[in-house]
Amino acid sequence: MNSKTYQASTMSEALAEVKHELGRDAVILHTRSFRKGGVLGLFGGHPVWEVTAAPNVNVLPRPLEGTYAPVAVDGQTPHDETCDMDTDLFEGGYADPEAAAADLAVEAPPAEPARAEAITEQLCDIRQMLNSLMVSRIGEDGPKLPAALHELHNRLCEEEVAEKTATDLITELRMGLTGEELADHELARVRLAELIAERIHRAPEPAPPQRSTARVVALVGPTGVGKTTTVAKLAANMKLKKNLRVGLVTIDTYRIAAVDQLKTYAEIIELPLHTVLTPQEMHQAIYAMRGMDIVLIDTVGRSQNDRLRLNQLRSFLTAADADEIHLVVAATANRRCASKVLTQFCPLGANRIIVTKLDEAEAYGMVLNVAEACRLPLSYVSAGQEVPDDIDRADPHELASLIVGAN
């Protein structure tokens, strides 16, 4: 097989040359990127993409336009699989994978579902190839990383960001900066913070109250994460700062003095409080406070390993028919514990995340790990025990700054 190497400033341009000279059925043998010129290929110079390809002399007959034909390997045709590629990996500094995919995709009218699905499959294959290439560069060139990126990669590791996420971020950052920009430590830090902020989604502002019915909000989570204190902070802010009519419900009758704690808060803020013992009582309590603007539910803390208790909690939430279920996680949780919490509590219907104990955390990477793992938006963050203070709407940019150590 006669191979030929093509070089261009972007992957899409290199692939365009391959397609133009060798045709659409060309076989890509090898790809790599490097910097040409500058000092030691790290500072200055310009990025170069290199693609080695050869004409495919053993291709199957070309399928009709818009169809997809899997390539046989060892006489067997691979099964059709749905691509589960996370396209968020391609946002930012990658070398224009959409353009590269568009160059190789088969043109087809979008109105035909079968053809559109075939094109999507081919795009997924190309995206997977490009993503594998991007991620592998860190492993191959780790010791050769520019000083700024090496420092930031170490920072992410110290902040206990998941290894894959840290690698993806540094790869994306490297491909998005020029050689001159790579030498600017502060610029690289700012760009990294922007990439992190893009991965942390913020929950929308609560909708204005509807006088016909109360908005029901429940807080769930493991023991010791500060759910009761967080409920009190939210209730005080909604009552004193937003002038909303707030009602409280608690099912935390297992923990010593838990009801008394919330009762004290309710008396100080002058809010009605209902204590319920069964799902039926939960339904009755919600109905009794239907005239409120918002009803906050403080649930009993459950171990993420206690499936029986979690099922009981599910029955209470079903009876409450909550509009929002906020999963409360502590910033002090280690990666393994946080992962187990998400696995067990998200199926209860959680649709938002509250992060507590930021003031006690030694590292902040857990916030990013949670956001990446569950894909749920963050609603509030808490740092301290003061009621009604020490709670704020989640701000992705501020959280990203904590992770990268920006001023």
Image (cartoon, helix red, strand yellow):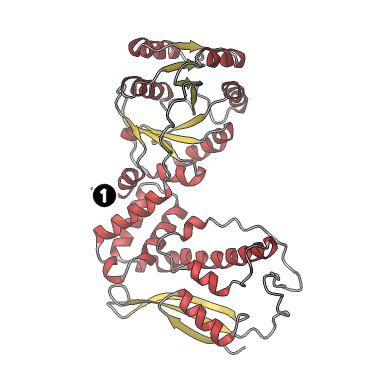
Q: Is 357 displayed left or right of 26 in the figure?
A: left
Task: Residue 177 in the image: state x and y as whole percent.
Answer: 33, 66
Asked where in the image residue 361 lies, by quadrant, the reply is top left
Q: Is residue 133 visible?
A: no
Residue at image coords 62%, 58% = 83
Name, please, the residue furthest toward the right: 75
5 above or below 63?
below
Q: Please give the count of numbered marks on the rendered protein.
A: 1
Q: Secondary structure at mark 1?
A: loop
3 above or below 279?
below
Q: Is 113 displayed left or right of 366 in the figure?
A: right
Asked where in the image residue 201 lies, by quadrant, the reply is top left
336 above or below 107?
above
Residue at image coords 57%, 78% = 28
Q: Residues within 10 Å of mark 1 (few under 14, many from 20)?
A: few
Q: Is 267 displayed left or right of 113 in the figure?
A: left
